[in-house]
Amino acid sequence: MLAGLTFLQAFVILFQGKYLADALVNSWQMKPLQSIMLPVTLFAVAFVVRHLLNLLNTKIVQYYSGKMSEEIRSQLLDKVYNSGPQMISERGTGNLVTASLDGIDLVENYFKLIFTKMMNMSIIPPVLLVYIYFQNIASGITLTIIVPLIILFMIILGLAAQSKADEQYAQYTILSNHFLDALRGLPTLKMLGLSKRYVKNIYTVSDEYRRRTMNTLRIAILSTFALDWLTTLGIAILAVFLGLGLINNQLPLFPALVTLILAPEYFLPLRDFSSDYHATLDGKNALTNILSILERRDTEDTDKLDKLTWDKDSSLEINNLQFNYSDEEKADAVSLDVDHLKLSGYHHIGVIGKSGSGKSTLIRVIGGFLTPEHNSNITINGQKVPHFTQRNWQKELTFLPQSPYLFSGTLAKNIAFYRPEASQEEIENAADKAGLKDFINTLKDGYETMIGEGGRGISGGQQQRIMIARAFLANDRHILIFDEPTAHLDIETEYALKKPMEELFKNHLVIFATHRLHWIKEMDYVVVMDDGEIVEQGTPKELGSHEGAYSDLIENMRGDTL
């Protein structure tokens, strides 16, 4: 439909130039007013029809762009929802938020601009050029020669602008992730007195983004100026030849005049496309990024594990577990290579190691948030599975991260995260066990108190207590995975949380990643990690009886060097 309307618009532009030239020629030849009024009227009709067709084209493209952008947004959100935390772990929250919000808006704008401009540039100039050839062959040849030169110049500057835009969009994604990480870590930075120092870091990243944006705009403005200059020069050269032809009586007035009137219309689609091309680069980059997410393969074989109820006789054995981050995901992250690890019953397993040793990666793989390589050998209760992203495995898990996420809603609904159908009495019992009762009693609306998105209005310690209450309420889940849950808390708050957490450990398999020394005393078994590998494992007593990685790590912990 867009192509057909653009084709009609090309002929309307042609008629508009022809009738205007007819009116001017008749006026120059001093013909009767009636012979002038008819072409002027037809020119006016063509002018109105042209803009009506242009309006209709715009409406069609806007409708299509809005529909397609919403469809892409829906597909993107479905992909993120189905992939879950694995997608967030690989891509980064800031990247996904940028793609879902700003990225979709950029894609919609890209669709609005690119289709109309492409159609105009592909259809209108050829139609006008054929007519000009019939009027004056020399003028047609002149226009034919000028256009390839302009396009070549556009390509050269366009490639330069594309390169800059790619860098700028990548920097925008980095900035988004950086800004989100800064917000998440702000309480810790303030507690450590480092928030002012971090301001300079944010300023540096922001200023780098500004500099890259200005470099991109500089090239875009330069190319727009160059294109305008070339097209103006082309029209001027054409006008000189036509003028000489008229002076020497080698060319009638009408062909010269109609050619000169249509020449700017001939170049106009090319100029519009060039100027809007730079405006669509961000949209093109955003679309490329979104399509790369949509093309990402979902994790397969998520129902290989039979119904699971973890108890004191259950076991998990891992052999040759490997995981590697791709370059585009986390180039500086630690890969995982675990030869052997066996967990069973209601044991409490401590995972320790210096920063960057792979503790969190191991925790996320076991939690099913990251998918290991295909050759990994995983056995749960005697049943082999390709990875931990098994629905029945994850139904047995309660995951307690460093920064528990609280959703916008009531306090009661946040506590009932794992069991939305829980009764008010069960929610209150879980809150009491987590030590939340006194805090909730101080609130005007009690359990119906509204919490802001991300836990706004709730302190870090209380957020952790809400997380513990969630675990107490999910008493049908018997596997607890802790990813340094007290890392961002001061020692007093952590000590206050320790008692309810120890109560929570009972009748659970506990996998506890930490760098705090006092938690090791609560563990039955310790796994020591370094550079993505398990370098030592055993009971604290066994590992402490000889010099090794465990003893060195304990010594470092006591020296506060971790």
Image (cartoon, helix red, strand yellow):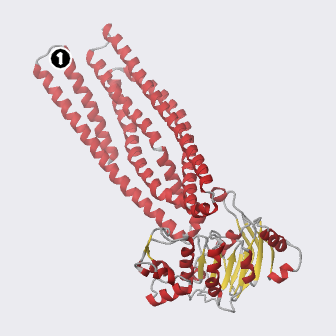
Residue 370 in view of the camera: yes
Residue 423 in view of the camera: no
Q: To which quarter of the image does residue 262 belong?
A: top left
Residue at 48% across, 87% down: 428
**In the rendered image, the vertical position of residue 120 relative to residue 92, given as above or below:** above
Q: Where residue 71 sits in the image (x, y, percent)?
A: 41, 60
Q: Nearer the viewer, residue 471 or 456?
A: 456
Q: Nearer the viewer, residue 177 or 318?
A: 177
Q: Where residue 254 sits in the image (x, y, percent)?
A: 26, 19
Q: To which quarter of the image does residue 255 belong?
A: top left
Residue at 75% across, 70% down: 353
Residue at 47% across, 27% down: 226
Residue at 56% across, 88% down: 475
Which residue is denoted by mark 1 in the rendering? 27
> Total label count?
1
Q: Find numbered disc 1 in the image and state the secondary structure of the residue it sits on.
A: helix
Q: Where residue 362 sits in the image (x, y, percent)?
A: 69, 72
Q: Nearer the viewer, residue 253 or 83?
A: 83
Q: Where residue 508 sits in the image (x, y, percent)?
A: 65, 87
Relative to 556, 215 lies left or right: left
Query: If the image is split into quadrants, where does the C terminus sit?
Result: bottom right
Q: Nearer the viewer, residue 80 or 470?
A: 470
View extreme (right): residue: 546
Relative to 295, 46 lies left or right: left
**In the rendered image, the vertical position of residue 369 relative to residue 283, given as above or below:** below
Relative to 276, 548 lies left or right: right
**In the rendered image, the vertical position of residue 124 relative to residue 208, given as above or below:** above
- Neighbourhood count class around disc 1 (C-alpha, 10 Å): few under 14, some 14–19, many 20 upward: some
Q: Amino acid at mark 1?
A: Ser
Q: To which quarter of the image does residue 263 belong?
A: top left
